[in-house]
Image: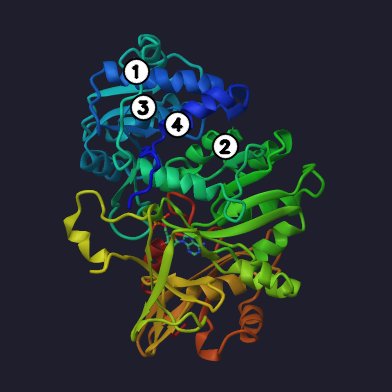
Amino acid sequence: MRGTMMDFPLTIQPILERAGKLFPAVEIVSRQPDRSLKSTTYGEIYLRSRRLARALELAGMARGDRVATLMWNHSAHLEAYLGVPVSGGVLHSLNLRLHPDELAYIANHARDRYLIVDDVLLPVYESFRANANFERVFVVPFSGGKIPRAHENYEDFLSAADDEFVYPLLEENEAAAMCFTSGTTGKAKGVVYSHRALVLHSLTQSLTDCFGISHNDVLLPASSMFHANGWGLPFTATMVGAKLVLPGPHVDAESLLDLIEGEKVTLACAVPTVWFGVLAALEKYPGRWKIANPVRIICGGSAVPESLLRGLDRFGFHITHLWGMTETAPLATTGLIKSTLAHCTEDDKYKIRAKQGVPAPFVELRVMGAQGEAPWDGATSGELEVRGPWIAATYFEAPETADRWTADGWFRTGDVATIDNEGYVKILDRSKDLIKSGGEWISSVDLENALMCHPGVREAAVIGVAHPKWQERPLAVIVAKEGVSVQPEELREFLATKFAKWQLPDAFVFATEIPRTSVGKFLKTKLREQYANWNWGR
Ligand code: ADP
């Protein structure tokens, strides 16, 4: 017997429509290139997204055509996030920090037809223009300056359209957006999100037990809108009508803290390196920012060390840890403390919060060890596999990657993890980052997290470096806190209380910074190159 409910497609259209009808007065604040703040509303975004949809239609955009963006986080990018998919197009946000060759490769591989680019990012576009194939390029006057004559002005493109936009009837499994993996490892691969996946992802993301994004939030997505589907936040925020505060190009710690204070932000999202910077600024300038409310932070993309959780708690910033990937839209786990664990000591709760959390509803996880599926015992490790309604089932036109999926339909994440008896996932490493020493594995993440608990350490990255006897041995790259001097011996002793002797790094080198990926993660491939010829005899 079939249910008697309506077969109502899950698409982005009702998300935009509802925001336009119910939340027209809710503000969206964007930081401009000159640092001033520009305010608009969901009412305006509604009109302009539909205008964009109509303009693209008149420009001949067909269903499934890709519209690329090369933009910072600001209101026009939100318009594209909404306007492109509601008209049947596919929003493809390009990572503006990539090398020109990679940008050209990605835009060509995706067969992007149109590009919307911020005027301040024209130099990035120019850097790969010769190798790209956009039919039309629209330049957003983000800085308020004149658009060079050679280019089409995005505002003119919008004004030339009429208000006749009618939502096309979309199927929920049609493509809405696409994003390429940020390329921390290997060549970038495309993930195409369906309308249905994004709607279900938004509904889940807004749950109190996940990100808890509600209409009453003031949300600051400091994670880039070009990283991992903008973390799904543009859709979820619009769905619930949360006030948005978009940082534009100013994503340094002090600018973010100014926004958090000035706009009374209640929820902010970014990778851990952003929050290392925020913590350092809060410690450096005590009392400078008056943060009225506790600020909830959603943090993931790489492991969140316990020291960061504790450090930010002291200033009223409460981190919820998440694990996710471009391939998982990205929400897969969140650091919910279960009611049955509420009795745990504060110390134990920090240990739980430093794990990557429990799977979100509808996301299924398993760890595949050498002996098959690992028990949930918190000890048996293996590759983490995932499946669910917003998990990629293939990469975009990349048949050579088919082995990333198992025969029974799970996605192989490339992360090595354990799951404990309460369902908490602990990521030990990316499989490529695990350090293989004398036939044993050492988790670089565990060492990094422990090192970052040392009071003199601001950041630490640990890599495996080839060793004549042990195959690989760990080397730690340390950024000390400003004005603090730390000695290798002291760090060794500090770690020796938590790790076996063979797991301790054999070398500690001091640096002023750790190289970052295009989305702000530690760039371990670069470190491995840098220290490839390390002389262990020294
Ligand atoms: P890239 O692989 O290029 O970095 P993604 O941003 O999609 O692109 O990265 C997903 C990967 O980031 C995961 O497979 C995992 O290795 C890492 N990651 C994400 N969240 C966490 C987390 N909370 N803890 C540890 N690693 C994480």
Figure check: 413 above or below 188: below
> What's the CA distance linking mark 1 and mark 2?
24 Å
Closest to the observer: 316 or 485? Answer: 316
Tag 4: amino acid = Pro
The type of residue carrying mark 3 is Ile
Q: Residues within 10 Å of mark 1 (few under 14, many from 20)?
A: many
| Above or below, comparing residue 166 to residue 317 in the picture | above
Label 3 – label 1 distance at C-alpha: 15 Å
* Ligand 1 falls in quadrant: bottom left
Crowding around mark 2 (Cα neighbors within 10 Å: few <14, some 14 to 19, many 20+) is many
Q: Position of residue 464 (x, y in %)?
A: 42, 76
Q: x and y percent of residue 202 in the render?
A: 49, 45
Query: What is the spatial separation of the Cα atoms under label 3 and label 4, in whole angstroms?
Result: 24 Å
Residue furthest left in the image: 399
The span from disc 1 to disc 4 (Cα, nearest Å) is 17 Å
Mark 1 residue type: Arg
Earlier residue among tags 2 and 3: 3
Comparing labels 3 and 4, the label whose residue is closer to the camera: 4
Q: Nearer the viewer, residue 100 or 382?
A: 382
462 sits to left or right of 407: right
Q: Pick whichever of labels 1 and 2 is earlier in the sequence.
A: 1
Residue tagged 4: 14
* Callouts 1 and 4 close, C-beta under 8 Å: no
Residue 94 in the image: x percent, y percent?
36, 39
Residue denoted by label 3: 116
- CA–CA distance between discs 2 and 4? 11 Å
Look at mark 2 in the image and give the residue it sits on. 240
**Amino acid identity at mark 2:** Val
Q: Is residue 107 above or below residue 389?
A: above
Task: Write the residue at 59% across / 52% down.
Answer: 298
